[in-house]
Amino acid sequence: MQTIILGGGCFWCTESVFLHIKGVSSVVSGYAGGQADTANYEAVCGGDTGHIEVIKVDFDDTVIDLSGILDIFFATHDPTTQDRQGNDIGRQYASVIFYTHDEQVDIIHHKINELKQQGIAVVTEVYSAPTFYPAESYHQNFYANNPTQGYCNFAIPPKLAKLRSNFAQFFKAS
């Protein structure tokens, strides 16, 4: 098993994608990377802590390796916009990867360099994993628990369609 912490905009969106991946055993929405000793949704969204909305992903690397996880991550969010995903603007929406093992660093940088060689201006930040603060319980599995929520219905179905289309071998039905 491996763990990686990913920030790719609203954690409702990234969580929804990774909950559909074969080999992923756990996805927890939360906050990481800020200066405060704790984090909560109100403070993070207010820009008071410097934290980023992230997901902590535990995965079985015999089913899907880190390279596959990163391919999905980069394909299902925009890694070219600084502190922004669509209409969501602010530090809390940064594209970031927090690695949990030093062995992950080379794989992450290799993947970013591949994208840059394809002409993609990746701004994704890479850091060693800081303290991870799980988000409030109502944020966990948000899309599945709130299927009629407007923002989710606008943002998440296209990401899931891209996942099904481009990564069918890793897609698991919910």
Image: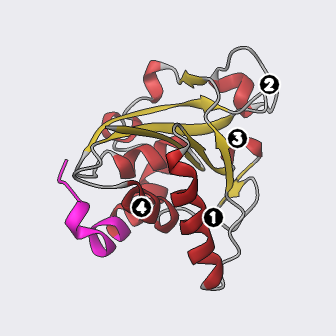
Horizontally, residue 92 falls left or right of residue 1, namely right
Q: Secondary structure at mark 3?
A: helix
Q: Mark 3 or mark 4, which has the lower sequence index?
A: 4
Q: What's under tag 1, amino acid-wise?
A: Pro
| Residue 120, percent from left and from top | 65, 79
Distance of label 4 from label 2 (alpha carbons): 30 Å
Who is closer to the viewer here, 49 or 145? 49
Q: Mark 4 or mark 2, which has the lower sequence index?
A: 2
Magenta segment, principal secondary structure? helix
The residue range painted magenta reads 162-174
Distance of label 3 from label 1 (alpha carbons): 14 Å
Viewer-nearest of discs 4 and 2: 4
What is the tally of numbered marks visible in this picture?
4
Viewer-nearest of discs 1 and 4: 4
Distance of label 3 from label 4 (alpha carbons): 25 Å
Of the numbered discs in the image, which one, if any, rests on residue 67? 4
Q: Is residue 170 magenta?
A: yes
Q: What residue is pinned by disc 3?
A: 92
Q: What residue is pinned by disc 1?
A: 79
Instruction: From this view, report whether residue 31 is shown above or below residue 63.
Output: above
Q: What's under tag 4, amino acid-wise?
A: Ser
Horizontally, residue 90 falls left or right of residue 99, namely right
Q: What's under tag 2, amino acid-wise?
A: Gln
Q: Residues within 10 Å of mark 2 (few under 14, many from 20)?
A: few
Q: Secondary structure at mark 1?
A: loop
Who is closer to the viewer here, 140 or 55? 55
Tell me what residue is drawn at x 61 percent, y 30 percent.
31
| Residue 16, percent from left and from top | 38, 47
